[in-house]
Amino acid sequence: MTTAPHDTRLPAWLPGATHALLRVMTGLLFMQHGLQKLFGLLVDPSRPWNGAPPMFSQFWFAGVLEVFGGALIVLGLLTRPVAFLLAGEMAVAYFQAHFPRNFWPVLNGGEGSVLFCFIFLHLFAVGAGPWSVDDALRRRTRARLEP
């Protein structure tokens, strides 16, 4: 007696769901860095927070990009331009703060910056995905334009 082959195809909804999960979790994790910089939230209790960085300083701009750019990534709103900007921020962060310490990210503490940079480059290339404000706006516009 033979058995029917097992269907190994993924459910149709799974790629969109995992794309959204990657985008949302990346945005939420990224926002935490800005919340530390700008508001002193989620800081190590053994190290005192010295207050927000001076307005319009490089560190302040980084915090603003992390909080508000991260929120836009979570929502999937303006994803491509925001992701491109955030990938650039992470490249600058890596080469300014980590690379001078050592060539290898595992030795210079820069794994997070590198990973964020490449996830944002991925989001820039492929967009927010099907479960996003960008996609809802695109579908709404397409529906209005169709006869």
Image (spheres, rainbow, N blue to C red):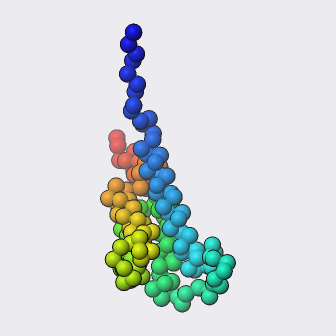
Residue 61 percent across, percent down from the top left? 47, 81
Residue 111 location (% of width, % of height) = 42, 69
Residues 48 and 124: in front is 48
Q: Residue furthest top?
A: 1
Answer left or right for 142 relative to 21.
left
Q: Position of residue 71 (x, y in %)?
A: 52, 65
Q: Quadrant of the C terminus?
A: top left
The N terminus, quarter of image: top left
Q: Residue at x 33, y 77 (%)?
A: 103
**Residue furthest front in the image:** 107
Q: In the displayed structure, does residue 69 sit left or right of residue 145?
A: right
Q: Position of residue 137 (x, y in %)?
A: 43, 53
- Name above or below for residue 60 compared with residue 66: below
Question: In the image shown, does 77 or 125 lie closer to the viewer?
Answer: 125
For residue 34, what is the image quadrant? bottom right
Does the image show residue 16? yes
